[in-house]
Every structure is written in structure tokens, then in C-alpha cells.
Image (cartoon, grey):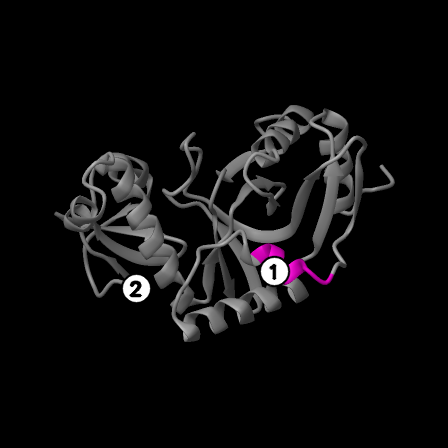
Amino acid sequence: MERDYLIAGLRVRMDTFGRTEALAQPYCALHGGEPDIHICSQQEYCRAHRPDAPLDELEYMGTSRDFYTQLLQHDGMALHASAILVDGRAWLFSADSGVGKSTHRALWQQVLGEDRVLIINDDKPALRRLDGQWYAYGTPWCGKEGLNRNLWAPVGGLCLLERGDTNAIAPYTADDLLFRLLRQTQPVQACDALNHLLTLMDTLTKEVPIWRLRCTPTPEAALLAYRHMTGKANE
């Protein structure tokens, strides 16, 4: 049965089950009006293409793909990142799998306190540009730990993480920034969708402060990032 959800400020109608349905419960909305995003049932597609794989996991991946693909039509995109809410703004940490974005997020909670650092989405927040401002949103598609909240906040900054033997942070100025961000988003195939995604990403790099953090998995790294990203480097 199709249900309506409010996700990333949009009415999303989807027929889902299992893990996706459970994680989407906080986003439930009254049924009504035309949806902004319509996600059809994934069951037949999943059975046809991967009959040997767990249906629940395939459906979760399929609904994620459909949501983020259609989100492009609303000036939005996915970003493989951990997004947290601190003092009214969203701060994002992105990295290749295994580098430690969730570890770094947990260190912010350790340094600042879990009551002050709220997880918006620990794996794939939605980013949208509305009236010249970028916002980060929680979504049901949030990685293996299922950490997300139905929250949204203006983006304060984005930090691209790299492993290091010492801690060092600086504005990201390398020429590969757009390519690096492209690796961390939902792949698209159609040329017009890819062009729109690249345009959005280029706008993001111009309007949102982006840092490169080479770090160790220590509280000192989180404190360094917090001070620089929030403009409190001298504290």
C-alpha cells in the first residue's frame, strides 16, 4: 500500500516494506495531493534482477536510488556523509568508505556532548538549495546503523576527511574538489541529469565553506575541526 512521507521538504509517495518502511515511520504524513516524488514498488524489480539476494536489502537500496535520482528535479542531491546539528547549523563530514566519517562524528559528540550534537543522518543526508541557502535533511536512507532524525538545518560547512598521522585542517583548494564530491553522491546516467548534478555541485562549492581535514581518530581532531569550521579557531 502506498503511503505519503515528508522527506527533505517534499511529499514522497512510496509503496515500501521491511527496513525502509520502519526507518521511514518518523517521516509519515497524511495522504493527499500530488506527490513531489513517487517511488513505485521495488519488489518485482528486486526479484527479477537479484533473486538470490535479501529482498529487504535490495528494496532499501532501490528506494534510496529512486529518491535521490528524483531529488535532482528539486535542486537536491545525496551526499555520502555524516551530518550533525550543532547550535542551529548542519555540519557534514564526507570521506571514502572506511576512512572514519562516523568515527569523527562520534568524536564531536564526545567533545561537545550528545545533548548538543544531534545526528541528522549518518550516511546519506539529502542536500537542497532553497532561495540561495543550502540545507541538510534527515532521510530514512542512513546506512547500516540506521542513525537519522527527521530534522533539517542550514548547512554551516562541509569537511572532507583523510587519514593522517597528525591533525591538520585548511580550506579545500585543490582542483579535484568537484571530482571528489561526485564520487560521494548518487550516480546518474542521463546526460541532462548529470549536467544538473554537476551544476548543483559547482554551486555548492561556491556557497558552502569546504575544508580538508587530515586527522587521527582522536578527540583533538574533532576539537580542531569544530574550532575552524565554526570560526572559533582562537578559542
- Residue to which mark 1 is pinned: 179
Q: Nearer the viewer, mark 2 or mark 1?
A: 1
Of the numbered discs 2 and 1, the one sitting upstream in the chain is 2
Identified by mark 2, the residue type is Asp
- Residue at position x 33%, y 39% from top? 26
> From the viewer's perspective, is 71 left or right of 163?
left
The residue that appears at 29% across and 49% down in the rendered structure is 62
Report the magenta residues as a range.
Answer: 175-181
Residue 222: mark: none
**Residue furthest left in the image:** 1
Vertical comparison of 74 with 41: above or below: below
Image position, residue 49 (x, y; %) = 21, 48
51 inside magenta stretch: no
- Residue marked by disc 2: 36
Classify mark 1: residues with Cα within 10 Å, few (<14), some (14-19) or many (20+).
few
Residue 94 falls in image quadrant: top right
Q: Position of residue 2 (x, y in %)?
A: 16, 51
Q: Is residue 43 visible?
A: yes
- Indicate left or right for 108 with 57 as reference: right
Please report contact status of discs 2 and 1: CB closer than 8 Å, yes or no: no
Say what secondary structure mark 2 lies in: loop
Judging depth in this view, the residue of 7 and 80 nearest the camera is 80
Give the side of residue 163 with respect to residue 145, left or right: right
Which is more toward the observer, 145 or 13? 145
Q: Residue at x 19, y 59 (%)?
A: 32
Question: Residue 39 appears at what percent x and percent y?
Answer: 24, 56
Q: Residue furthest bottom?
A: 192
Q: Position of residue 159 (x, y in %)?
A: 67, 47
